[in-house]
Amino acid sequence: MTSTRRFFRPTWAEVHLGALRENLRRFRRRMPRSTRILFVVKGDAYGHGAAACARAAQQARAADWLGVSSVEEGVALREAGIRLPILVLGSLYPFESFLAAVEFGLTPTVASLDSARRLAEVARRQRRRVSCHLKLETGMGRIGMSPAAAVAAAGYLAETRLVEVSGAYTHFSCAETDRAFTLEQLRRFRGALRGLAGAGVSPRLHHAANSAAALRLPAARLDMVRPGLAIYGLYPGFRAVLSLKSKVVFLKTVPRGAAIGYGATFRARRPTIVATVPIGYADGWSRRLSNRGQALLGGRRCPVIGSISMDMLMLDATAVPGVRVGDDVVLIGRQGREEIAAPEVAAAAGTIPYETTTALTSRVPRSFLPS
């Protein structure tokens, strides 16, 4: 499958769906056979294109569930023909959100007694039985119920006989960095599940682990895991799925002492060949990479010089022999023997890989490649 979108500005992202399917299969091989895979495609699949990534997973039968952050994201997937079960991981508000979730066959999260009441009211209006997953708070401090509140909400739903609690989950706050606290969250989650069971509520699916927890902590795998980072190749041991590319659109040679970009934050220390590339912060390429980021040109690493502007950035191309307008520039990905991976870009910008790819705006067309 390839993108049919036509674009003229030579800046685009290539999404390698074959790599994504390979990562899903590789991840599944590292999990117990009984553990289901919920592939997280929120945030437009971390900037990779949610519909295309979900469709690739569905066609390869490589995921059991999909995870989104909002009803709107789930509806868009349904309208794109995605049939897999979809869990809305966020807290739903207002009332109409639950109605849309039920109408489009999405599984909502219940994170409070109030949301349980709202979902039950939708079920009554629709005269149909629906299901949900309970969100339990174990240390993230974002959304979720205490064990006592979860028992109350589950008990209320059981009394209605209209809403099935088919799952219960929590969210680890630092699975990548703090094993001890992650294990403490897991202990709290298991305690909450025992409380639910004592109240006669036993959801079929218990889940807590993201990519890092699933790969590092076998005890956290439970009935289902929720990988995102690994499937997009943003975690060690998995193949990168997204490449970001552009081209040189302007070249000039400036003398020693010449100022480059807004604020004159860079001044040439020698005669310098400056290559202008049409990508900037309006495309999601962070200004924090000004005078510290790099890109590949002619198979060489070239430093970003000057402040990144809304639509353009400049590279020092002095070391690239025979550089010309129209030459390919790689900002994420491989060129020749060199590679710049998204985690490296994120580190240079002082952020995380999630933000680096998710920040890429709709101004950057995605080209979906089958391999």
Image (cartoon, helix red, strand yellow):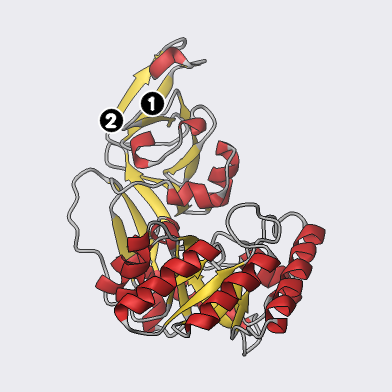
Q: Is residue 23 in view from this perspective?
A: no
Q: In this view, does 367 lie above or below 121?
A: above
Relative to 273, is 209 on the left or the right? right
Which part of the image, by quadrant, shows the N terminus? bottom left
Cβ atoms under marks 2 and 1 closer than 8 Å: no
Name the residue carrying label 1.
274
Quadrant showing the C terminus: bottom left
- Which residue ends up furthest to the right in the rendered image? 180
Q: Is residue 345 above or below residue 114?
A: above
Q: Quadrant of residue 261?
A: top left
Residue displayed at 42% across by 71% down: 119
Q: Where in the figure is residue 370, as x and y percent of width and height?
A: 34, 73
SS at mark 1? Answer: strand
| Residue at x 50% of width, y 33% of height | 289
- Report how far apart the C-alphas of labels 2 and 1 lie in the structure: 8 Å
Three-letter code for the amino acid on which mark 1 is drawn:
Val
Mark 2 sits on what residue?
250
Left or right? Give the position of 209 relative to 116: right
State which quadrant residue 167 falls in.
bottom right
Residue 263: tell me if it is visible: yes
Q: Where is residue 55 in the image (x, y as percent from the top left)?
A: 34, 75
Give the class, few, some or many, for how many residues have Cα within 10 Å of label 1's Cα (few <14, many ≥20): many
Can you tell which quarter of the image residue 366 is in? bottom left
Compared with residue 296, is residue 158 higher up or lower down, i.e. above or below?
below
Q: Give coordinates of residue 163: x percent, y percent.
A: 46, 80
For residue 344, which numbered disc appears in the image?
A: none
